[in-house]
């Protein structure tokens, strides 16, 4: 049976994103645990808030969790940029990962808009 949010493409992509971040942070130089921890928290927050929002009865609450998930996507952008600037990841890989963040942000924006439209009807 499963949970409804597990069928959402944005949820699957968010879990995939967190997995990428966990792998990336494992490869960071020693002494970067604060950055790694923050990056992992932001990355996991995306799927966690999608799941929690989907479990809420009221659209206003649901929308709030989806907004938090979108904020976590935006939080990942400067963390990714720091990794690129420090040369911990290549420019090409950073560009690829940033494109994934842009897709997640757009998908979450659509989810948020859909929540608003359901409330209007």
Image (cartoon, rainbow, N blue to C red):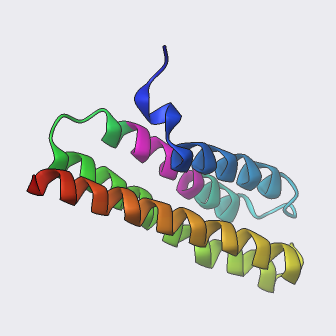
- Relative to 73, does residue 40 appear above or below in the rendering? above
Residue at 50% x, 52% y is 46
| Residue 51 visible to an observer of this rendering | yes
Return the residue nearer the eye: 5 or 76.
5
Residues in magenta? 41-51
Residue at 60% x, 78% y is 78
How many marks the image carries: the answer is 0
- Rendered image quadrant of residue 25: bottom right
Residue at 31% x, 51% y is 65
Q: Residue furthest left?
A: 121
Image location of residue 110, percent across then percent down: 39, 62
Residue 114 is one of the magenta-drawn residues: no
Residue 46 is one of the magenta-drawn residues: yes
Image location of residue 64, percent across then percent down: 25, 55
Image location of residue 37, percent across then percent down: 64, 54
- Relative to 110, does residue 13 appear above or below in the rendering? above
Helix, strand or loop for the magenta stretch, by majority: helix
Q: Residue furthest front?
A: 121
Residue at 69% x, 80% y is 81
Q: In screen coordinates, is 47 left or right of 12?
A: left
Image location of residue 55, percent across then percent down: 30, 32
Return the residue nearer the eye: 8 or 84.
8
Q: In screen coordinates, is 79 left or right of 73?
A: right
- Relative to 80, does residue 54 appear above or below in the rendering? above
């Amino acid at each position: 049976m499963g949970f409804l949010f597990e069928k959402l493409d944005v949820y699957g992509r968010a879990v995939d994103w967190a997995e990428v971040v966990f792998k990336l942070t494992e490869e960071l130089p020693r002494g970067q645990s604060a950055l790694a921890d923050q990056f992992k928290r932001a990355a996991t927050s995306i799927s966690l808030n999608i799941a929690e929002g989907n479990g809420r009865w009221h659209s206003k609450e649901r929308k709030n969790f989806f907004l938090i998930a979108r904020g976590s996507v935006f939080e990942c952008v400067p963390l990714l940029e720091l990794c690129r600037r420090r040369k911990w990841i290549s420019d090409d890989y950073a560009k690829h990962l940033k494109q994934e963040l842009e897709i997640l942000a757009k998908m979450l924006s659509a989810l948020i808009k859909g929540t608003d439209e359901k409330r209007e009807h």
